[in-house]
């Protein structure tokens, strides 16, 4: 009997093993928030689970409508806890967020949970994701501080998108994708950073590609890059002006995550995206009559600048 092969440990945090992303070769340790896994773990004999997002019991998949999912890292993690989201979300949205995850990590999680290689042989309808999917990708921020070039980051997105298209071809459905641009976080974009630590040009170029992708595919864009800045940079050589009050961390050198006010605004943008995707299906050439971003405004004091 051969001894078991020792797996290689990959850890972004000091935390228990992630059973979703680990396999025979790698022991992966990272915080992984998966509503799909949570629903599967709690499924009763009627195929229902208590959902931490909706705060009620419902089937794992509603086959009467598109399956809505946010795939990302920490950028939109816990967004369902905001007042804006909890009071205004009309349907279930899956969240699959890997804290510290890069694009390839989120891509792998999508393949494992929503498009596994063995799914054609899988007879459990709860595990098969055969419905059309409306997908919001919110990953890429953790690629910025790596040696990945702009071209490599874009190719990582394109590889991810190719897998999503493979899913729709296999199941003869129509999947729609909207990509969130990367935040201009002070941690890697502040004007006070030395040139070799300032990644503003990289973020700017990746975001230019993301916005172009959104316009050319669904025609629906999300301006998450407006969060935490007074206005969007048009020329990265001139730097970016931050609104430091909209970031969670107290020191500017550590500012990476949105604060409460920015999260509420981001939740409104996210819900607007899914509503707009619904209008693509029902009213293809007519914009939504109801502006979610206006109605979900949080009661906060307005700041000066183009981006709130």
Image (spheres, grey):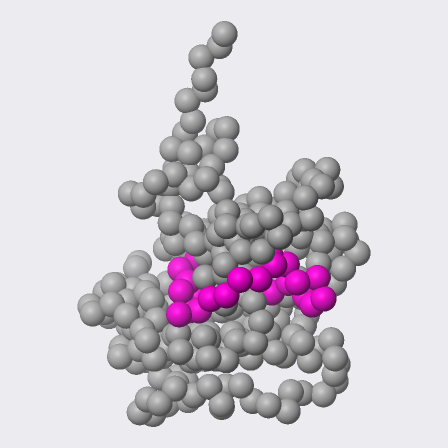
Q: Is residue 214 above or below residue 132?
A: below
Left/right placement of residue 63 relative to residue 254 reads right
Q: Measuring from the top left, give residue 75's x and y in whole percent.
A: 41, 64
Q: Nearer the viewer, residue 241 or 47?
A: 47
- Report the number of discs: 0
Q: Measuring from the top left, give residue 90's x and y in whole percent.
A: 56, 76
Q: Residue at x 58, y 71 (%)?
A: 91
The C terminus, quarter of image: bottom left
Left/right placement of residue 36 relative to residue 187 reads right
Q: Nearer the viewer, residue 123 or 232?
A: 123
The verdict on residue 65 being magenta is yes
Outermost residue toward the front in this view: 45
Q: Is residue 75 visible?
A: no
Q: Residue at x 41, y 22 (%)?
A: 6
Left/right placement of residue 65 relative to residue 74 reads right
Q: Which residues are magenta?
A: 55-81
Q: Is residue 297 visible?
A: yes
Q: Residue at x 30, y 59 (%)?
A: 197
Q: Residue at x 39, y 70 (%)?
A: 81
Q: Nearer the viewer, residue 304 or 288?
A: 288
Q: Measuring from the top left, give residue 247's x and y in whole percent.
A: 30, 73
Q: Measuring from the top left, give residue 277's x and y in whole percent.
A: 65, 75
Q: Is residue 6 above or below residue 28?
A: above
The verdict on residue 62 being magenta is yes
Outermost residue toward the right in this view: 172
Outermost residue toward the top in this view: 1
């Amino acid at each position: 009997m051969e001894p078991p092969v020792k797996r290689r440990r990959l850890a972004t945090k000091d935390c228990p093993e992630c059973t979703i992303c680990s396999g025979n070769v790698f022991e992966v340790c990272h915080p992984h928030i998966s509503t799909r896994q949570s629903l599967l773990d709690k499924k009763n004999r009627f195929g229902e689970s208590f959902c931490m997002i909706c705060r009620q019991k419902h089937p794992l998949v509603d086959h009467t409508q598109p399956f809505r999912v946010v795939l990302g890292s920490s950028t939109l993690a816990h967004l369902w806890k905001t007042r804006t989201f909890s009071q205004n979300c009309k349907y279930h949205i899956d969240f699959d967020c890997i804290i510290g995850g890069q694009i390839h990590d989120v891509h792998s999680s999508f393949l494992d949970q929503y498009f596994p290689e063995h799914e054609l042989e899988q007879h459990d309808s709860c595990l098969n994701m055969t419905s059309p999917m409306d997908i919001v990708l919110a990953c890429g921020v953790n690629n910025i501080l790596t040696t990945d070039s702009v071209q490599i980051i874009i190719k990582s997105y394109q590889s991810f998108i190719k897998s999503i298209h493979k899913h729709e071809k296999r199941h003869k459905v129509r999947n729609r994708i909207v990509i969130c641009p990367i935040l201009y976080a002070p941690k890697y974009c502040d004007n006070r950073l030395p040139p070799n630590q300032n990644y503003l040009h990289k973020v700017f170029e990746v975001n230019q590609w993301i916005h172009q992708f959104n316009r050319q595919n669904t025609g629906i864009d999300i301006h998450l890059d407006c969060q935490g800045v007074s206005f969007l940079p048009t020329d990265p050589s001139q730097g970016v002006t931050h609104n430091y009050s909209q970031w969670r961390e107290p020191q500017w050198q550590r500012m990476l995550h949105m604060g409460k006010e920015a999260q509420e605004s981001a939740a409104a943008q996210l819900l607007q995206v899914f509503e707009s995707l619904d209008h693509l299906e029902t009213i293809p050439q007519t914009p939504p009559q109801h502006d979610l971003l206006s109605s979900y405004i949080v009661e906060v004091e307005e700041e000066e600048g183009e981006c709130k």
